[in-house]
Image (tube, grey):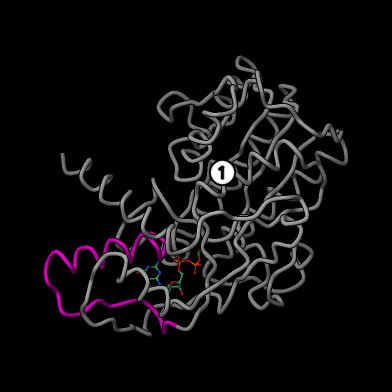
Amino acid sequence: MAKTPFELKGRRVFVAGHRGMVGSALVRRLASEDVELLTVARAEVDLRNQAAVFDWFAKKRPQAVFLAAAKVGGIIANNTLRAEFIYDNLVLATNIIQASHQSGAEKLMFLGSSCIYPRLAPQPMREDSMLTGPLEITNEPYAIAKIAGIKMVEAYRSQYGSDFISVMPTNLYGPGDNYHPEYSHVVAALIRRFHEAKVAGAPEVVVWGTGTPRREFLYVDDLADACIHLMKTYSSDELVNIGTGEDITIAEFARMVAGAVGYRGVISFDPSRPDGTPRKLLDVSRLARLGWRAPTSLEDGIKLAYQAFLREHQQAAE
Ligand code: GFB
């Protein structure tokens, strides 16, 4: 089962979800790995369609699979599109994990999320705190689907001896993010809101919630680098958290984004919007023991994300 180090070089590597923020970062990172990269457009194969997925895997026979396809969104998207979040994420996990097994993939990495840990898990959250308490209600459907994926990986390892692993990224941001005003995550939402307020000369920007929740943010290219490192060197049924090990309040974070964007007006808070989990800081000591730490500081990452927003915004306008 455990065949570490796992050589990526020369292998057929499938990135499921290559158009998403995480998948496109994996594709960028894999460009320096000398692999035969496999991706598939949604118009060709909808990864939620079991027959189409089984068929595609039988033809392409990827040797390594990154399962980065997911229905994702911020706190309001998770809380509103509850059926889509549980259905899409469950079906993506079951289709791709089973297809990888059937077609003889040698290695698979399943990407989960820090919201699989209990709402009030002791901080920083260790990998063994999964399933020790109730989940945050606003993203429970998403978290349950991700927990199911983790349990599938464990089960396939145990019954079939598959070299499948699971990693848990913290809140992510960077190029390719979704800037939808209502459904995005906080980083993309605030970059866009502060930018538009600066351009319009607006005197005030409203930030959702009380500003007191704490969040940890990881630049998505750092996540991709950690994933490649673990794909090559890690094989165990224990999860691995991927984060920076540092968090910040939403209020402080909003001030940082305003600074990076160059917005000088007033920042106010709207407590009628949900705060979500009070704090979710990952314990990254297992990852550190495995030889990886995040290279990009939050200050630098926000600047890079703002540049990416300006580029993507420009392209969308053209
Ligand atoms: O990023 P976010 O939507 O995700 O919100 P979660 C983080 C925090 O930022 C919350 C606050 O406390 C929000 O209230 N916030 C402030 C805002 N202003 C805004 C804004 O304009 N937009 C958004 N979206 N938030 C998600 C989960 O939780 O995190 C998912 O729902 C997933 O399942 C993802 O785990 C990583 O950290 O609260």
The residue nearer to you, when weighing 76 against 35, is: 35
**Vertical placement of 225 versus 168: above or below?**
above
Residue displayed at 45% across by 45% down = 21
- Where's residue 280, x and y in %? 60, 71
Taking the spot 80% from the left edge, 52% from the top edge, the residue there is 238
Tell whether 77 sits left or right of 163: left
Q: Find the residue positioned furthest to the top.
A: 59
Quarter of the figure that contains the N terminus: top right
Q: Is residue 318 above or below residue 11?
A: below
- 135 or 261, nearer to the observer: 261
Tell me the magenta residue range.
184-211
Name the residue carrying label 1.
224
Nearest the viewer among 44 and 185 is 185
Residue 313 horizontal side relative to residue 33, left or right: left
Q: Residue 304: horizontal and vertical position, in percent?
A: 38, 53
How dense is the environment of label 1, judged by Cα within 10 Å: few (below 14), some, or many (20 and up)?
many
In what element is the residue under mark 1? helix
